[in-house]
Image (cartoon, helix red, strand yellow):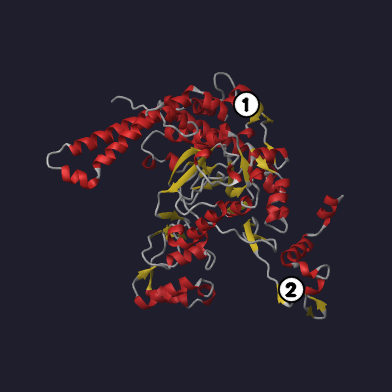
């Protein structure tokens, strides 16, 4: 009865309730109404709520575009909503390790659910950004600030000379919307002359503005070190970490992004749909790694079309076989127990263009969820994730199975009400039923999208058999690749309980292949230390190098290396490696 009452409250009334909740003070007691008022307009009460005479302004967020008009779908945020302070520390290229949780002291209770933890470190000084929204003057404030600075590397922006820059500055409806840094930049360009750029003017290509403008952004934590410092200082105080100890930020959640597209056509070539995912999906490891192996993407401004995409599939980024990365990633996910969540970008179904709006919204939702609420087990138990099953359709050739189970689980209206409701006044309008169930928009597009995904997965997996790299895959990855390529593994489907039981942390820790990874790691550490010791001994034995060796403390270094060699050669060290990645036993074929 209470839930029905809550559901019956109109959204505009709920907004007022949130406003009262946001500004209410205990000393008001029940006499809070006198603090809120509206003006009288043309003899009737107005619509702008005031608090003690001060107008309350609402904040709105874009969640995609309207298909018919192309206009924005904007929704009001709760009056008590305060945006999270975020510090971006990584982008495309990141190095990471996995260690047992017990080896990291002073961690808060939210990490207790993980037996092992991933620690990542960005390897880039600058991030390769594509500022899609910068074409809208004043919208992308960060890009305008960056491009107004010095020593900026850009690509696919229009070269603008002094005369054109002056014309742009005189277009009031354009210039006045820009942020102050970009206005100052344009004035400086007019004064100094020469060629320059404007953030809202991408390069003209084939008579049209390119959709792939790029620039190198100095990493935010480097450009604004104070933000990172305050985040670390607050963490130290909360965890009571001494100033002499390192402050470690382990990964607490893995939420991949995926680009989806509706059916389309480019220069006579049909682009098949991939818009079958709702805003957030969860996949168990077999289905998740089918996606990871394939790295399929929808039509993107930065690619020539759709297909396998991402750094994982590009040779220049990975000189070794892809199986090494995939093996390590699979072991990492099993050790840590991180959930295989993903968010949608591009399109949700053929009718809802969302660009990156959902992806940018996810951190706001996730940080407002308790640790247990971020687990798939909790969400499934409470009906906030629903499983997608295979189903059959009638065709002229007979019954046809649609492998919808490859999509895993997807969020439900309960998830939207519970968690998106912590952000929006009316979450059900922002994330509606058609977005939660893309098949309602078009059953045909939904089926075609799943078949396109499965076909791409099959083609991608077959390459591992054709080039022979299947032999480098760990046993669990081999299962995934066999199912992707041939639909089964030794006659068993991916849904077979025996197969599923192998994809657990406990089963992997007992397996011979994981133990071999640990032995390989120990052997490589031993070989490395023996090489270091030989190099130090050779240096000390060089004629006339005694004083230099003493100055560099080579003798102490040699003693330390001998002690470390004794440590890593012991059985105890092998036990300490349990819960880590170990090392992939890569075997190089003889020429």
Residue at the limit of the structure toward the right, as seen here = 1
Q: Residue at x 47, y 54 (%)?
A: 243
How far across and how far down the image is residue 305, in percent? 48, 45
Disc marking residue 432: none
Residue at x 65%, y 48% (from the top left corner)? 370
Element type where label 1 sits in the image: loop
Closer to the N terminus: mark 1 or mark 2? 2
**Residue at image coords 53%, 45%:** 251
- Is residue 3 something one can see in this rendering? yes
As drawn, 490 above or below 115: above
Q: Quadrant of the C terminus?
A: top left
Asked where in the image residue 585 lies, by quadrant, the reply is: top left
Query: Which residue reaches farthest left?
Result: 543
Question: Position of 10 compared to 584: left or right?
Answer: right
Residue for badge 2: 51
Which of 360 and 244 lies nearest the eye of the viewer? Answer: 244
Q: Is residue 345 left or right of residue 225?
A: right
Tell me residue 379's x, y (percent): 68, 41
Q: Secondary structure at mark 2?
A: strand
Residue 286 position in % (x across, y down): 57, 31
Q: Is residue 133 left or right of residue 431?
A: left
Q: Nearer the viewer, residue 461 or 104?
A: 104
Query: How many C-alpha atoms fall within 10 Å of the one at disc 2: few (<14), some, or many (≥20)?
Result: some
Of badges 1 and 2, nearer the viewer stands 2
**In this picture, is 469 found above or below 190?**
above
Is 357 located above or below residue 373 in the figure? below
> Can the viewer see residue 200?
no
How far separated are the C-alphas under marks 1 and 2?
Answer: 58 Å
- Place of residue 535 in the rendered image (x, y in percent of width and height, measured from the top left): 23, 36
Instruction: Say which residue label 1 marks.
Output: 495
């Amino acid at each position: 009865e209470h839930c029905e009452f809550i559901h019956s409250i109109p959204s505009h009334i709920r907004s007022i309730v949130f406003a009262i909740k946001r500004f209410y003070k205990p000393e008001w007691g029940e006499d809070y109404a006198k603090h809120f008022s509206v003006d009288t307009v043309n003899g009737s009460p107005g619509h702008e709520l005031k608090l003690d005479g001060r107008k309350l302004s609402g904040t709105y967020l874009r969640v995609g575009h309207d298909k018919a008009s192309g206009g924005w779908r904007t929704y009001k945020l709760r009056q008590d909503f305060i945006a999270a302070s975020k510090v971006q520390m990584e982008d495309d290229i990141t190095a990471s390790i996995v260690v047992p949780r017990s080896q990291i002291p002073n961690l808060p209770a939210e990490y207790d659910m993980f037996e092992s933890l991933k620690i990542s470190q960005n390897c880039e000084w600058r991030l390769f950004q594509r500022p899609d929204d910068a074409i809208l003057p004043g919208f992308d404030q960060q890009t305008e600030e960056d491009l107004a600075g010095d020593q900026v590397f850009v690509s696919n922006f229009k070269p603008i000379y002094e005369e054109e820059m002056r014309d742009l500055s005189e277009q009031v409806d354009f210039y006045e919307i820009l942020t102050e840094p970009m206005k100052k930049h344009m004035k400086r360009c007019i004064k100094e002359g020469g060629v320059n750029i404007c953030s809202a003017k991408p390069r003209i290509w084939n008579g049209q503005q390119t959709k792939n403008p790029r620039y190198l952004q100095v990493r935010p934590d480097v450009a604004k070190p104070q933000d990172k410092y305050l985040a670390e200082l607050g963490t130290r105080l909360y965890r009571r970490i001494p100033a002499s100890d390192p402050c470690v930020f382990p990964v607490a959640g893995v939420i991949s992004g995926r680009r989806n597209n509706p059916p389309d056509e480019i220069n006579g070539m049909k682009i098949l749909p991939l818009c079958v995912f709702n805003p957030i999906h969860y996949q168990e490891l077999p289905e998740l790694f089918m996606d990871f192996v394939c790295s399929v993407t929808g039509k993107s401004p930065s690619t020539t079309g759709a297909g396998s995409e991402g750094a994982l599939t590009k040779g220049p980024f990975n000189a070794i076989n892809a199986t090494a990365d995939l093996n390590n990633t699979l072991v990492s996910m099993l050790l840590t127990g991180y959930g295989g969540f993903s968010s949608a970008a591009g399109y949700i179904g053929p009718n809802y263009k969302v660009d990156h709006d959902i992806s940018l919204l996810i951190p706001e939702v996730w940080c407002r969820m308790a640790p247990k609420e971020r687990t798939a087990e909790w969400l499934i138990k409470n009906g906030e994730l629903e499983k997608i099953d295979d189903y059959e359709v009638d065709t002229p050739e007979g019954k046809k199975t649609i492998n919808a189970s490859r999509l895993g689980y997807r969020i439900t209206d309960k998830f939207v009400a519970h968690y998106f409701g912590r952000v929006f006044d009316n979450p059900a309008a922002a994330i509606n039923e058609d977005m939660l169930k893309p098949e309602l928009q078009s059953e045909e597009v939904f089926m075609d999208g799943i078949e396109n995904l499965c076909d791409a997965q099959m083609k991608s997996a077959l390459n591992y058999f054709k080039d022979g790299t299947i032999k480098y895959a760990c046993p669990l990855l081999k299962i995934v690749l066999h199912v992707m390529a041939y639909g089964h593994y030794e006659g068993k489907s991916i849904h077979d309980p025996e197969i599923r039981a192998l994809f657990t942390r406990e089963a992997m820790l007992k397996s011979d292949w994981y133990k071999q990874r640990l032995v390989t790691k120990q052997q490589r550490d031993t070989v490395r230390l023996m090489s270091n010791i030989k190099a130090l001994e050779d240096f000390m034995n060089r004629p006339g190098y005694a004083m230099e060796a003493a100055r560099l403390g080579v003798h102490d270094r040699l003693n330390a290396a001998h002690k470390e060699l004794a440590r890593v050669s012991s059985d105890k060290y092998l036990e300490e490696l349990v819960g880590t990645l170990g090392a992939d036993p890569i075997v190089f074929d003889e020429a």
